[in-house]
Image: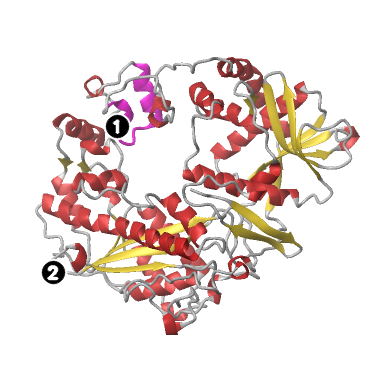
Amino acid sequence: MDTSLELKSVGPDGYRVHFGGSGSPGEEGRSASLGRLGRDRLEPDQLTKSRYMTGTAENERVMWFDSRGRLSPNIGERWRMEQGNLVAELAREEFPDGEFVGGPPSGSQLQPTRPLFEVRFSVGDMAVRVDMLRPGPSGEWVLTEVKSSTMTSRSSQKKARQDVAFQVHVLNEAGVPLSRAEVMHLNPEYVHPGSGHSASEHSASKPSSNGSPGDESSSNAHSSNAHSSNAHSSNAHSSDAHSSDQRSNNEELFTREDLTGELSDYVQEAREKVPAFAAVLGRDQPPNLWPSRACNTCDCPEPCHDLPDHSVLTLPRLYYGHLSQIIEEGRWTLSEIEGHPHLKPKHQNYIQAARSGEPYVDTPEVREALSELKFPLYFLDFEAIDYALPPFEGTSPWEKVPFQYSLHVVEEGQESLRTEDVAHEEFLCADDGDPRQALAERLLEDIGREGSIVVYNATFEKGILEDLQDALPQEEFPRWEGRLESYIDRLWDQGKIFQNGHYVHPSQKGSWSLKKVLPAFDPGLEYDDLSVQEGMEAVVEYSRMISPETPDSEAQKIEEDLLKYCEWDTWAMVVIHKKLSALVGRDPTAPSRAPLSG
C-alpha cells in the first residue's frame, strides 16, 4: 500500500502538502522527498542509528532480523516515516544557506562555514547519518536531530536522548568537534493560523457530487442515507483543488531543545552497548533470548520459544512489572500462575475461560452495564487522519481530524435486528478540504436529542467530539445549542464490558479489541475479507482517495472500501449488543430506565 507524501511547495506563506502518490495499493511507493535523499544501502553488520535504537528499545534479536531486511514496517509505521520525511524536508528550509550532502562529507564541506544536511559518518562498525550539522563557535559544530514528534511523552524524550547520544558517540570517534547537540522537533503548542481550508468555511448543506458541501442540487451520491460524496469529478480531482491553500506560517512550528548537558549518561550507555550490538550484527544467525515480556510483542519471523496459545503473556492487561516478576520466577503456563498474588479477578476469569474452552460471562455485571442504555441506540464509529504538519486552520501537529463516520440506529421495541432492518447512516468527506464542519453538520442531523451513543473505546470518540467542539465553537454556531457537548455526555462504551473482564472468550487471547471480540459472537464476521481492515489502512487509503494523481475509477473503489470498513465496525457493535443481551437474558431493544435527553 502506497503511503507516499511530499511537500508541494514551501515559500513565504508557509508549506503546502501534497498527499499521495501514483502507486497502486500493492506497490511500495517512496515519496519524492525520500527519493531525493539518495539513501545508500548499508551492510547488515553495520550498527546504524536506527539499529542501535531497535536494539535499545526492543532487543538484539529484533535488531538482527531488522538488519537483514526481514522485518517490514507496518502501515502505521510507514505513514509516520513518510510524515517524518516531510518534517525533515521542511526543517531544512529553516536554513536556506545549507547544503544537502546525502553521504560522506568532503574535506571542504567539513569546514564549518554553512549548515550541512544528511551527512554520513562511518567509524569501524558504526555508521550514522546526521540530519543537520550547523556551524558553531570556535570551528566546532552543532549537531541537530530533527524529530517529527512533539516530544511530549517521557518515552519520546528518552528515545531522543538515546538517539542523539549515539550520534555524539560516533562523531566523537570520528574526530568531529561538537559544541552542542540538540533536538529540533514539532512544537506541540503550534496552531495553524489560517489562510487555508478552515472548519468554518464549509456550508451546512449536504455535500454535492463533486465533494463541495455548498451545492445542494446534487447531493447523496450513494443513497438516501449515505452522505459520502463522489469527489472525483473533473473539478474536485484537479491538482489545484487538491493542494491549494493548505498553508501556514512556519514560524514557531519547530522548537529546538539543547540536550548537551543531559547526554553524558546516555553517551556512556552507547559506549557500553555498541560492542555487544556490533557482535550480534556480525553473527550468521540471530541470538536466542531468554523469555521476557518482549516476547508478547515480538515481530521476529522465527520465534525463540514454542510458547502455548494461552500463557502468562496472554493474560489481559497484566501490569508490566508484575509480568516481569512472574517470568523471572519461571512461571509460564496457566497452571503455574493460577492463584498468583499478582493476578486480579479478570485474570482468573481468563484462566477459567481458557481451560474450559467456553466464554466466561459475569451475568450480573453485564446486565447492569446494559441497563444503562437509553433508546434509541446510536452505534457510532469515527475514522480520523492525523498530520505531522497540520493543514487546516486551528489544528496542531498530529491532531486527529475526523473525515468519516458510520452510524447504526436501533429503536426501542424494534422487532428485527437483521442487517436490512437496522437504519444506517454514513458520512465520508471525499474532497481535500477541512472535513470537520461538514461532518459535524451531518452528525447533528443523524443523531437525535435522546438516546445512548454506543462506541467501542470511548476515549477516541470523546476526543474527536471534544476537538470538534473546540474547532466549531457555539458562539459561531448558536443553532447547535450545545449538541456536541450532549453527545459527549451520552457516550456509552461497549468495550468496557470486555476491558473489565465481564465477558472473556478464550479466542480473544487476552485482547479486548473489537476485531478479537467480534468473532467470539459471530465467527462469520471477519475483517479479513475487507479491502480495508484497520484504522491506519483507512487513513492511508483516504489520503490516496483525495489525491489528484489517483485515477477516478480507483478513487471510487477506495471510497466504497472505506464506507464498507467503517460500516463493518458499527454493525459489529450491533451484533455484539444483540448476542450479549441474549446471553444474559435481556431483550436487546427493551429499555430499563427512562430515556436520557440532551
Residue occupying the far left of the picture: 585
Q: The disc labelled 2 sits on which kind of residue?
A: Gly
Q: The disc labelled 1 sits on which kind of residue?
A: Leu
Q: Where is residue 563 in the image (x, y as percent from the top left)?
A: 37, 62
Q: In which quarter of the image is the C terminus?
A: bottom left
> On the picture, is 293 further left or further right than 120?
left
> On the picture, is 454 further left or further right than 36?
left
Q: How crowded is mark 1: few (under 14 residues within 10 Å), some or many (20 or more)?
A: many
Question: For residue 300, what is the image quadrant?
Answer: top left
Are discs 1 and 2 less than 8 Å apart at CB? no
Which residue is disc 1 drawn over? 315
Q: Can the viewer see residue 186 in this picture?
A: no
* Residue 413 disc label: 2
Q: Can the viewer see residue 414 in this picture?
A: yes
Q: Is the magenta stretch mostly helix, strand or loop?
A: helix
Q: Where is residue 63 in the image (x, y as percent from the top left)?
A: 53, 25
Q: Is mark 1 on a helix, strand or loop?
A: loop
Residue at the (37%, 21%) spot, across then down: 325
Question: For residue 392, what is the image quadrant?
Answer: bottom right
Looking at the image, which is closer to me, 574 or 185? 574
Measured in 3D between alpha carbons, the distance from the residue under mark 1 to the one under mark 2, in whole angstroms, is 39 Å
Q: Where is residue 136 in the image (x, y as percent from the top left)?
A: 85, 38
> On the picture, is 563 further left or further right than 145?
left
Q: What stretch is highlighted in magenta?
A: 311-329
The stretch drawn in magenta includes residue 312: yes
Q: Is residue 472 above or below residue 565?
A: below
Residue at the (49%, 35%) spot, across then down: 72
